[in-house]
Image (tube, rainbow, N blue to C red):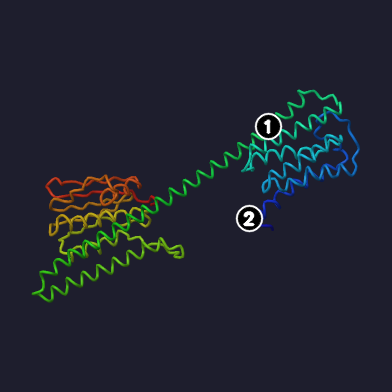
Amino acid sequence: MIDLRRAAELWRGLDVTVRDLPLGLVFFAASFVPSLHNHGTMLGGVPDRPFDLLAVVAIALQCLPLALRRRWPAASLALVSAGFAVDQLMGYHTLAGTGLAIAVLSAGAHVERRRRATVLVLTAAYAVLWAALAQLGTGETPVGFATFYLALAFVWGIGAWLRSTRAMEAERRRRVAEDTRTAERTRIARELHDVVTHHVTAMVVQAEAARYLTADPERLDGSLTAVTDTGRRAITDLRSLLDLLNPDHGAGARTPPVGRVLTLVEQTRRAGQPVEFSEEGAPAESTGGADLVAFRVVQEALTNALKHARGSRTSVLVRHGEKEITVEVGTEGPGPRTGSPGGSGRGLAGLRERVDVLGGDLEAGPGPEGGFVVRARIPAGSRS
């Protein structure tokens, strides 16, 4: 049994000239069917003439060049037009005359350069044919010649419309591809911002604390170990993100799930920030991009706590629902001065954009009892 899909792929893989040739061969063969003799296009009223060797040449010129109608549309149109002129002047009136309309349509759709010149040359050639047929005294009225020319112009217009439609579709695809690349670059920039900001902030806080622990070797060793561990985690996360930029890397970046929030909390505690963590509900099997966004909300909030409320009590609550993940991070202290989302697209502003993409909402501002609170509701199951 023939695999139709495989056959279609093989057919599309052939050269365009090979794919266009069968159409010309069909008209070429049909033109020699006895019952179809002298039943083709008739322009000028020249009396019918029996087929001869010149008729075969005229038919070949009108049919076989259709194989070139997309690769070399202007050349195809020139050859077909020459065959059509011989066909009408000699009175063969073959079915192959239909090839002129196909060649004109293809030229209107596929000629890219000197389109106006092509139209002018075609018009001039038609005027010469008109004059030659009129010279034969066949009785064709000017209205008939004009009507045929307008019909050819209409066919060209259809081809031009197809060309513009194809160009608009190509432009739309280009814009979609550009928007996709821009969105991906923006996403990677945000990921790098989150990773670098959090880990470097934690390392700076731990290094500063180590300056005051020279008299306590055990605590100093623990602080330096925390700096080292944080650096290793930063390198691991950065490698995962940079893998996205490597076209030879198939696995892509690893996305931290909500389950890693506890590790993040432990790291922040080791940096000297008292953090209370609680988690309600069980994570869903498939959350789309919600788990990563929830992780980044906690990461950014804890980074801000280290920056602006170092040493202040901080609480982290992650609640898993059937259709959403709720995150709340509260810190005693002033909180970040740039807490209102909006602006450069970094920090809390970038988080709001991420949450909005998934159809959720994020609030960041002073808490009811002071301090600073970040709350996010993130619908689960949506693709990031």
Residue 127 position, x and y percent, is 75, 31
Q: How many discs mark residues in the rendered view?
A: 2
Q: Nearer the viewer, residue 192 or 90?
A: 90
Query: SS at mark 1?
Result: helix
Kind of residue sitting beneath label 2: Glu
Point out the residue furthest to the left here.
Answer: 215
Cβ atoms at labels 2 and 1 below 8 Å apart: no
Tag 1 residue: 153
Q: Nearer the viewer, mark 2 or mark 1?
A: 1
Q: Nearer the viewer, residue 260 or 167?
A: 167
Sequence-wise, which precedes: disc 2 or disc 1? Answer: 2
Residue 5 shown left or right of residue 268 in the figure? right
In which quadrant is the N terminus drawn?
bottom right
Q: Which mark is residue 336?
A: none
Residue 108 shown left or right of residue 82 in the figure? left
Mark 1 residue crowding within 10 angstroms, few (<14) / some (14–19) / many (20+):
some
Query: SS at mark 2?
Result: helix
Tag 2 residue: 9
Residue 121 position, x and y percent, is 70, 36
Kind of residue sitting beneath label 1: Ala
Q: Nearer the viewer, residue 2 or 197?
A: 197
Residue 277 position, x and y percent, is 20, 59
Mark 2 residue crowding within 10 angstroms, few (<14) / some (14–19) / many (20+):
few
